[in-house]
Image (spheres, rainbow, N blue to C red):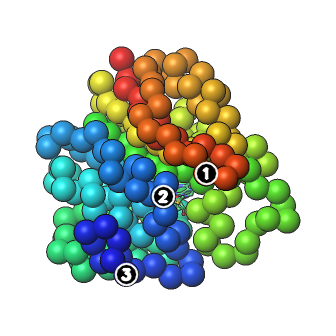
Amino acid sequence: MKMGKYNIKTDDLVYEPAEDTFLLAENLQINPEDSVLEIGTGSGLVAIYAREKSDKITVSDININALEIAEENFKNNGINDIEIKFGNLYEPFENRKFDVILFNTPYLPTEKEDIIDTDLNYAFDGGVDGRKVIDPFLYGLKNHLNKHGKVQMIQSSLSNIEKTFEILESEGFICEITKKEHFFFEDVVLITATLI
Ligand SMILES: C[S@@+](CC[C@H](N)C(=O)[O-])C[C@H]1O[C@@H](n2cnc3c(N)ncnc32)[C@H](O)[C@@H]1O
């Protein structure tokens, strides 16, 4: 399927690029020399946009099906140098640090009855308050960002944007809402934060 400029394949087990994907992909703040980690790459489309700006791109996902599809999508779009890692958040990265970290998070508040029993669940399930993945992601950032490093993340007004700002500021970041889109029952925002 054509997605923007690229041919992207997905399947039932992988998040199909949506408005939130493009909110991140089309507003990347990456310099040519930056090393970039995209956590939760899904189909790989954000990483493909990031590869236009830097040749040091690493991606990860907790959903192995996503990584297989992302690898195929990279190859089908002529990209052979993106590093691919499997695992939960920072687990695959031990002491490694990056200049930029990207994450379109699973931000939806999710009750038990809303859980689906395939790996696609990882794409949406933010736990009851929507912050099950966001909070450990935020608290791990400092250990994996270089000096003056930057994070760009997507979340929803349903999962407490103020709390994200509080955590980021307490961890030493300055942050802003770079873009906001309104949907029926929520705002989806791109937050950009820089370590000072
Ligand atoms: C909303 S989808 C975004 C996918 C893709 N980046 C995009 O924007 O289209 C969230 C992605 O994060 C992955 N994910 C969820 N929790 C994760 C975790 N703890 N560690 C790594 N990846 C995770 C999911 O499997 C899913 O691919």
- Residue neighbourhood size for the residue with mark 3, other residues' Cα within 10 Å, grouped as few (<14), some (14–19), many (≥20): few
Which residue is under mark 3? 1
Residue 138 visible to an observer of this rendering? yes
Crowd tier of the residue under label 2, counting other residues whose Cα lies within 10 Å: few below 14, some 14–19, many 20 or above:
few
Image height of 31 relative to 118, above or below = above
Task: Name which residue type carries label 1.
Answer: Phe
Residue 22 vs residue 34: left or right? right
Specify the amino acid type for callout 3: Met
Q: Residue 19 got which mark?
A: 2
**157 is higher (above) or lower (below) than 78:** above
Return the mark for residue 40. none
Distance of mark 2 from mark 1, alpha carbons?
10 Å
Label 3: which secondary element: loop
Q: Where is residue 181 in the image (x, y as percent from the top left)?
A: 52, 45
Nearer-the-camera pick, 107 or 3? 3
The amino acid sitting under disc 2 is Glu
Return the disc, 3 or 2, that comes first in the chain's sequence: 3
Q: Across the whole image, how many numbered discs are drawn on residues?
A: 3
State the quadrant of the C terminus: top left
Give the foreground label among 2 and 1.
1
Q: Which residue is drawn at 63% across and 60% down?
A: 124
Q: Please tell me whether residue 18 is drawn above or below residue 29 in the rendered image.
A: below
